[in-house]
Image (spheres, helix red, strand yellow):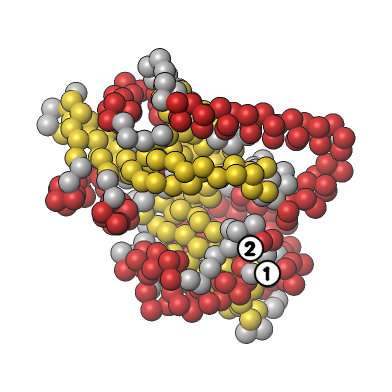
Amino acid sequence: MKVVSYDNGADLAALEDVWDRLCEPELRFVPSFAELQHHLRADGRKFRILTAVDNSQVVAMACFLYGDSIKRFEIATRKLFDLPVKEVTLLGSCVAGQANEDVIRKFFQVIIADGGFDVVSVGDILVDSPLYRAITSLHRGVVAWRIMRKQQIRWLIRLPGSFDEYISSLRATTKMRINRDGRRFEKMNPDFRVVSRPEDVGDFLRDAEKISRLTYQWHLGHGLRNDEHTRAWLTRLAEHGTLRCYVAHLQGKPCAFGCGELAHRTFGFHRTGYDPQFRTLSPGTALILRMIRDLIENTNCEVFDFGGGGETGYKSRLGTLGLSCSRMQTAAIYRPYSAVLVSLDQTMNLAKNAIMDLGGWIVGHGALKRRVKSALRPFGIGSY
């Protein structure tokens, strides 16, 4: 087994079939090769693709992007301060293919020896996966740590052959609630639209931003904006045939939207939102169910990847498979600035845990605690 490195844009075309072949078996969403090419060629940034070759065949691949970023330190949504960071990012938060711990460890050792950065952002990775075990067992002087105060659950749906089969796989209480809310919403004669063509992106973003501005996520800086950057991103996905967005209208007015992309038979769910004035009709849930139905009936999609979430909420209700994941970074602490960043992250996590533990002790458990957390969530408290 040998490791081969690529850092020249001229080499990319030869890797397309390899990337698609290695990503096909991945359970979670991994970007298409077209998106990989875009990120590698954007602004002429430095990159390195590492492949593991066994008997002349590539069996594993990882892509690392180099760039300057700003690391934000905050509690809830209150910013404390920012620090500039030279960062290497593992694209897609995965090593594609049949990579064991030894292979992944070799990849990261190559990147770390290369230098020229402060931290490596690995992203949301599955706990106890070969990637997780590899980065938490690198050589002395290199550490990996969680940059969020706690682990998350990555919710997925292994899509069955029909929508009815999917509904049957849900918990009884969820099915009852879905059927009740679905009937109420359908009585309003909603208009559902699927957006996958470049020419439809403008109308979708116009409607989506109207809805997004009404949500609490907008005030936390997480809304979907109808700006040049977002239009270019969605148009690019549409041109490559991976865009899959949805919008629902009631009485001629947009009331809910969902946004994602489909690659390697997996749908990556990016964002959703609904107009609060229609809350009693559960338009958000109705739209997501329509998305799931469309993916089952009209695409080759096999997995719906909600991304990270908590133990409660719509992702946990509608997801059928929950996997523990953690947002990780790694760095060489013998580099002084890297050591400072590690210490600050660890200190912030300790402070956040202390605050949440104190709040839990004051509020207690059960229904009261859930109501308090729900009331504070629009302010970003309890969601970090």
Above or below, 289 relative to 62: below
Q: Residue furthest left?
A: 56
Q: Nearer the viewer, residue 141 or 285?
A: 141
Residue in view at x 30 percent, y 41 percent: 63
- What residue type is disc 1 on? Leu
Give how far apart the Cα atoms at labels 1 and 2 are.
7 Å
Q: Quadrant of the C terminus?
A: top right
Above or below, 234 relative to 325: below
Q: Which element carries disc 2, helix, strand or loop?
A: helix
Residue 214: mark in rendering: 1
| Image location of residue 315, percent across then percent down | 61, 49
Judge from the rendering whether residue 65 lies leftward or rightward of residue 305; answer left or right. Answer: left
Callouts 1 and 2 close, C-beta under 8 Å: yes
- What residue type is disc 2 on? Trp
Judge from the rendering whether residue 129 lies leftward or rightward of residue 361; answer left or right. Answer: left
Judge from the rendering whether residue 295 lies leftward or rightward of residue 36; answer left or right. Answer: right
Residue matched to label 2: 218
Residue in view at x 66 percent, y 83 percent: 251
The image quadrant of residue 153 is: top right
Dot 1 surroundings within 10 Å: few (below 14), some, or many (20 or more)? some
Q: Nearer the viewer, residue 374 or 331?
A: 331
Q: Which element carries disc 1, helix, strand or loop?
A: loop
| Image location of residue 46, percent across then percent down | 27, 46
Would residue 52 be visible to someone looking at this image? yes
Dot 2 surroundings within 10 Å: few (below 14), some, or many (20 or more)? some
Residue in view at x 30 percent, y 56 percent: 42
Q: Nearer the viewer, residue 340 or 168?
A: 340
Q: Quadrant of the N terminus?
A: top left
